[in-house]
Image (cartoon, coloured by chain):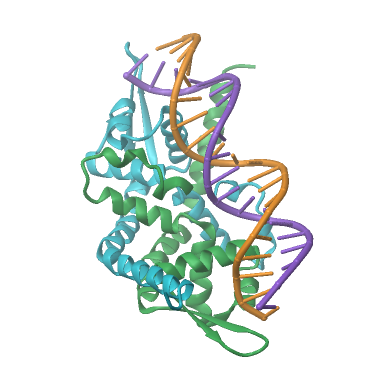
Chain colours: A green, B cyan, C orange, D purple
DNA sequence: CAGGATCCGCACAGATACTG
DNA sequence: CAGTATCTGTGCGGATCCTG
């Protein structure tokens, strides 16, 4: 996932929508990206520490990197207040807001199909168990 | 991304939809997963080697692992023909088909907003350049 | 308070070789 | 043809220390 936008010798394919797929995956194929986006979508404008608490498992490093990437791509706006102690606010841009919709669609899908997937996993597990122990 | 479903000491959060988010990301946060899914969605039933050619950059290892994961979660059906030489067909299950829709939504979003993102990146780049060179 | 810099482990991804 | 087994590198992600 990581080297997606660097080496990618897959680049030889005919060209078309595929690069976009790569972009999309490179962007959202990140646990923290989605979670940070979600926090901002739900709670609106948040400060650095509020975000860290909202996402909860995230480290400073990952929060900073994720925010930087999101800002760079125009998903979040960063506002610095020249006060002491420092204060920095993060909020979704219009672009970021539009991204939330398809993301929620994916989340909804997951929510609706969790048990179907769980069942599939159980079926798969028992199947491979049988295959492994034909008769004992 | 990878260890998402193993250790995850984030597990302490209150609980709710968050685990589902993790599941979704763990599943789709994978370059190959999306590409394999796409290939099957576009071309229908495919054999192992056909898939490898369709996805094109994928290694045997990754193809096998991806397919196994997809099968385990009930997204693809695997059919083995007891012939020689061996033949194995892969196709989307109904569940897999429903997943394609939200995925396409995300792809569409990416397609529509690529240039907006590109522009944002340029703006961000020039902004950080100015910050670095106040006057030269 | 917000974040930069650094060290390190570990899981994932790739390439290669082998098998039924 | 359709995989499995194994080795190795890389870069992500966490923890920690430090600064404005």
Horizontal arrangement in the rendering, residue B103 relative to residue A17 (left or right): right
Residue A73 locus on image (x, y percent): 39, 67
Residue B89 locus on image (x, y percent): 32, 28
- What residue appears at the point 55 percent right and 35 percent down from the top-left corner? A125
Depth check: give the residue in front, A19 or D5.
A19
Residue B73 locus on image (x, y percent): 47, 43
Instruction: In the rendered view, tell whether residue A9 sits above or below residue B125.
Output: above
Could you tell me if residue B49 is visible in this image? yes
- What residue appears at the point 44 percent right and 51 percent down from the top-left corner? B28
Quadrant of res A47? bottom right
Horizontal arrangement in the rendering, residue B63 relative to residue C6 (left or right): left
- What residue appears at the point 47 percent right and 64 percent down from the top-left corner? A69
Instruction: In the rendered view, tell whether residue A24 sits above or below residue B86.
Output: below
Instruction: In the rendered view, tell whether residue A113 sits above or below residue C18.
Output: below
Could you tell me if residue A100 is visible in this image? no
Horizontal arrangement in the rendering, residue B85 relative to residue D20 (left or right): left
Q: Residue furthest bottom?
A: A83
Residue D18 locus on image (x, y percent): 75, 66
- What residue appears at the point 35 percent right and 50 percent down from the top-left corner? A22
Depth check: give the residue in front, A47 or B33.
A47
Quadrant of res B125? bottom left
């Amino acid at each position: 996932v990581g080297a997606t936008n660097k080496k990618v010798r897959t680049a030889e394919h005919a060209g078309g929508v595929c690069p976009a797929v790569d972009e999309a995956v490179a962007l959202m194929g990140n646990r923290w990206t989605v979670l940070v986006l979600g926090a901002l979508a739900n709670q609106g404008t948040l400060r650095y520490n509020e975000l860290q608490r909202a996402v909860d498992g995230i480290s400073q490093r990952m929060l900073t990197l994720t925010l930087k990437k999101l800002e760079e791509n125009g998903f979040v706006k960063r506002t610095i207040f020249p006060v002491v102690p420092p204060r920095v606010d993060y909020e979704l841009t219009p672009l970021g807001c539009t991204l939330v919709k398809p993301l929620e669609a994916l989340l909804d899908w997951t929510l609706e199909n969790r048990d179907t997937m769980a069942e599939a996993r159980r079926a798969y597990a028992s199947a491979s168990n049988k295959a492994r122990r034909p008769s004992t």
